[in-house]
Image (cartoon, grey):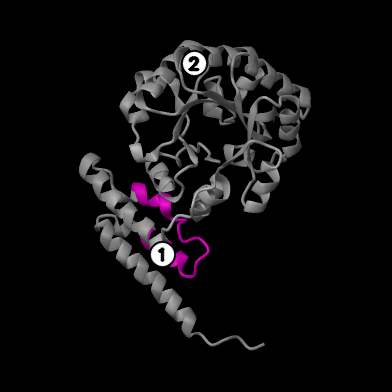
Amino acid sequence: MSVAPMMDWTDRHCRYFHRLLSRHALLYTEMVNAGAVLHGGTERHLRFDAQEQPVALQLGGCEPGDLARAARLGEAWGYREINLNCGCPSERVQRGAFGASLMKEPALVADCVKAMRDAVQLPVTVKHRVGLGRDESYGFVRDFVGQVAGAGCEVFIVHARNAWLEGLSPKQNREIPPLRYGVVHQLKADFPDLTFAINGGLSSDEALAEQLAQLDGAMIGREAYHNPWWLARWDTLYFGAPPQEVTREEIEETMVDYMAREHARYGTPWPSIARHMLGLRHGLRGARLWRQVWSDHHLKDWPAQTVMERARAAQETAQTKAADEPEPLA
């Protein structure tokens, strides 16, 4: 079980929050351009809190040498896995000739994987789509996996939608191309010795159970971000660990302490951190009011502790009002 790399979302603050909810789920960085790691401030791109572990570094790029050097830096910083992005469909990534467009060049991907494997002792994995454009032929993705596996990649994380590189935004690419879980199942059948984790459209324990009966793992994206309390069950359901004896209130208090530390050390404003936990009370009465307080830019100069107290008061008021309302007539 893992939380997907999501641009502008799964930064180190988000990962710290998610780690409070699951001790065992693998967390991924946002995609980091290998060139940025090498030339744009290594610490800024690779810094993370030790409490986030286990964390995987996802790299974007298409130059084997640059990727190898970036992977070596990732290993030195303590990441547990290096992942190559072959699934992002954004125009910016396409202009750099990497992301999903790399699936057109499996030989180049194989060279990139080999270069990284030669450079580090860590697992080198690949995240990719089941196809490109409107071509849904199975042979395309089968041959891609086969060639990349030949370079030593043993773990594939498969987003079960095609990437349409023209005409759709990244958001639309997560919603419009149809989900094709059967393609991922067939890959596992054809390459039984490889590890396959599935990604795309999974938002419930029931959906996960159906996929995990046939595959080796699952990567959850937006649902983990918008409904993070789901992660609190993962250790018990998927890792056989005892349930976490933790409450939403304790998680929120720990995050407020973290906000104070980050501000003292780096000058990080608390709203940059709080935005990642706005789904913590998803599904509870009064959650909307709680979110509104934490999101109120007029409070950005208030201490986070005071904002938390105000947010809780808003939610409690909503809960009390609901409790006082008369039962509806049958």
Q: Quickly name the residue at label 2.
A: 116
Q: Residues within 10 Å of mark 2 (few under 14, many from 20)?
A: many
Q: In whole angstroms, how far apart are the C-alphas of marks 2 and 1?
A: 45 Å
Regarding residue 265, the answer to whether it shows in the image is yes
Residue 183, given in percent of the width and then of the height, sits at 74, 33
Q: In this rendering, which labeled residue sits more in front, label 2 or label 1?
A: 2
Quadrant position of the C terminus in the picture:
bottom right
Q: Which secondary structure, mark 1?
A: helix
Specify whether 95 is left or right of 210: left
Image height check: is 252 above or below 187? below
> Where residue 7 appears, x then y in whole percent?
48, 37
**Which mark, residue 278?**
none
Residue hosting label 1: 290
Q: Would residue 135 appear left or right of 276 to someone viewing this image?
A: right
Residue at the image position 44 percent from the left and 75 percent from the top: 318
Q: Residue 279 in magenta?
A: yes
Q: Which image quarter holds the N terminus?
A: top right
Is residue 150 shown above or below 301? above
Place of residue 155 in the rendered image (x, y in percent of width and height, measured from the top left):
59, 26
The boundaries of the magenta stretch are 272-294
* Closer to the camera in the image, 245 or 140: 245
**Magenta span contains residue 75:** no
Quarter of image, res 71 = top left
Q: Quadrant of residue 319?
A: bottom left
Kindly report the secondary structure that dominates the magenta region of the rendered protein. helix
Foreground of the two, 136 or 23? 23
Q: In the image, what residue type sits under mark 2?
A: Met
Q: Is there any visible trace of residue 49 in the rendered image?
A: no
User: Could you tell me the amino acid type at mark 1?
Assistant: Trp
